[in-house]
Image (cartoon, rainbow, N blue to C red):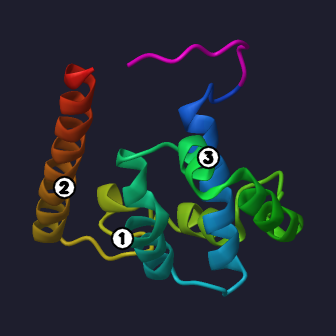
Amino acid sequence: MRVMVAKDIPGFLANRMQHALMREAWSLIDRGIATPEDVDIAVRYGFGFRYVAAGPILQKEMSGLDVNFLASSTVFPDLCNDAKPAAKLAAKVKAGELGMKAGKGFYDWPVEKIAKVKARYHTALKRGLHILKAEDDAG
């Protein structure tokens, strides 16, 4: 599958949408609304896994654009719109707590845990790609 981006903008398409999600995730953590673990669980077991079945626009077409319009009217005004990275993220970077490569970030990363998490991650990606490829092959 390929996408066409009509304009050259920072982050292009997928990275740009991912950063919008991350800005809100960091804001929820900074504001004490959720922990990093809660954010991960909400995405993985909430809306995230649905993206293998349908992208965000198709999902809203299925549930109804009117429903999405009403939800957007309530949620959009409260979404984070900061122009700089979140304070807790900046503090982690300043402290050298860079995630797996440093052995610590928001999570602790002993070597054996890194290997286990990376293996699970790669297996999950391969399974998701297998589903998408089978769909593409079927036409």
Circle 1 is placed at which residue position? 104
The quadrant in which the N terminus is found is top left
Between 108 and 94, the residue placed more toward the observer is 108
Inspect the image, locate mark 1, and give the three-letter code of the amino acid beneath it: Lys
* Residue 36, x across and y down, in percent: 49, 76
Please give the name of the residue rendered at 36% of the width and 70% of the height, measured from the top-left corner. 104
State which region is magenta: 1-9
* Residue 113, x across and y down, in percent: 16, 70
Tell me if residue 138 is in the magenta stretch: no
Give the numbered dot on residue 118: 2
Between 121 and 65, the residue placed more toward the observer is 65
As drawn, 110 above or below 60? below
Inspect the image, locate mark 2, and give the three-letter code of the amino acid beneath it: Lys
As drawn, 11 above or below 83? above
SS label for mark 3: helix
Q: CA distance from mark 1 to mark 2?
A: 15 Å
* Image-quadrant location for residue 135: top left
Between 135 and 43, the residue placed more toward the observer is 135
Please give the name of the residue rendered at 37% of the width and 58% of the height, measured from the top-left corner. 49
Please give the name of the residue rendered at 35% of the width and 46% of the height, measured from the top-left corner. 52
Q: Are marks 1 and 2 in contact (CB under 8 Å)?
A: no
The quadrant in which the C terminus is found is top left
Q: CA distance from mark 1 to mark 3?
A: 41 Å
Dominant secondary structure of the residues highlighted in magenta in the image: loop
